Amino acid sequence: MKIINAGDRIMNTWVYSIPEGFVMVDTGYPNKLSNVEKRLASHGISWPDVKYVFVTHAHDDHVGFLNELLGRCPDIKVILNPASMTVLRRGQNSFEGGYSTLGAYLFSGVLALWGKGKHLFPPLEERFDDRLLFITDESRRALEGLLRGRILFTPGHTGDSVSLQVGNVVFCGDAAMEGYPSSHHVTIWVENVAQFGRSWDTLCEGGAETVYPAHGKPFDMGELAECRSFVDSVKLRS
């Protein structure tokens, strides 16, 4: 399986190969479509090669140009948790929860300076609804066949968070993170600490060897197990 990163130092946009073409895990921030397009082209990949977008959750850095992409590419389908739809229609992140560490809280000020503090993105238009493939109990197995992977429900960062395990790697979105301003791989924003911890249990028990987060470099799954107890000590700041 070929895995490339079409994102940047802030946000990873993982793309992996399937027999029919490629699956893209999340998009990126609004107005980043051309950047991702150029990085794909550097690997010999064009938009018609991308068959599916797998949405890990509805935050501005993960679905920022999803609406624009669907307008540009009439054949791409989106695989997502139906619980993501409220935020996708609104075009703004949920602000339920809080920052997981003091460093994360201070980093929020940097995001505000970058103009990212309101966490806005273009809402998903209803005209694209026929290209949405929702993850349900009935559809899950068929969608896993399309993705050549296993869908894991990993809420905590957000209520709609899902991960995708493909072979011995797992694309976890923001169910875990690597590097500053996270601590012990805990994502800077958490809606529900108890759910977040249980989702780490799900990831650790899934059998993958390597975690591919949306932020930071891939890391060994064993590190999550080592840091698991830290999650229970997290006190959210808002």
Image (spheres, grey):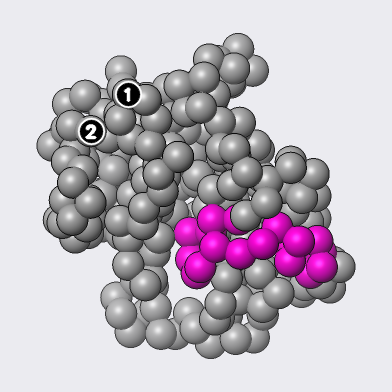
Classify residue 15 as left or right of residue 209.
left
Residue beneath disc 2: 49
What crowding class fits label 2: few (fewer than 14 Cα within 10 Å), some (14-19), or many (20 or more)?
Answer: some
Q: Quadrant of residue 157?
A: bottom right
Classify residue 32 as left or right of residue 197.
left
Q: Residue furthest front?
A: 1
Q: Picture coordinates of residue 123 (x, y %)?
A: 29, 44
The amino acid on which the numbered mark 2 sits, given as a three-letter code, is Asp
> What's drawn in magenta, residue-wise?
211-228
Q: Picture coordinates of residue 98 (x, y %)?
A: 63, 69
Q: Is residue 41 above or below residue 183?
A: above
Q: Quadrant of the N terminus?
A: top left
Identified at 32% across, 67% down, the residue is: 8
Is 226 colored magenta in this rendering? Answer: yes
CA distance separating discs 2 and 1: 8 Å
How many numbered marks appear?
2
Q: Quadrant of the C terminus?
A: bottom right
Examine the rendering and report whether any part of residue 225 can be seen.
yes
Identified at 36% across, 53% down, the residue is: 4
Element assignment for label 1: loop
Identified at 74% across, 41% down, the residue is: 206
Element assignment for label 2: helix
**Relative to the observer, which residue lies in front, 80 or 208?**
208
Tell me the tag on residue 20. 1
Identified at 86% across, 68% down, the residue is: 229
Q: Picture coordinates of residue 75 (x, y %)?
A: 21, 24
Q: Quadrant of residue 164?
A: top right
Examine the rendering and report whether any part of residue 199 can be seen.
no
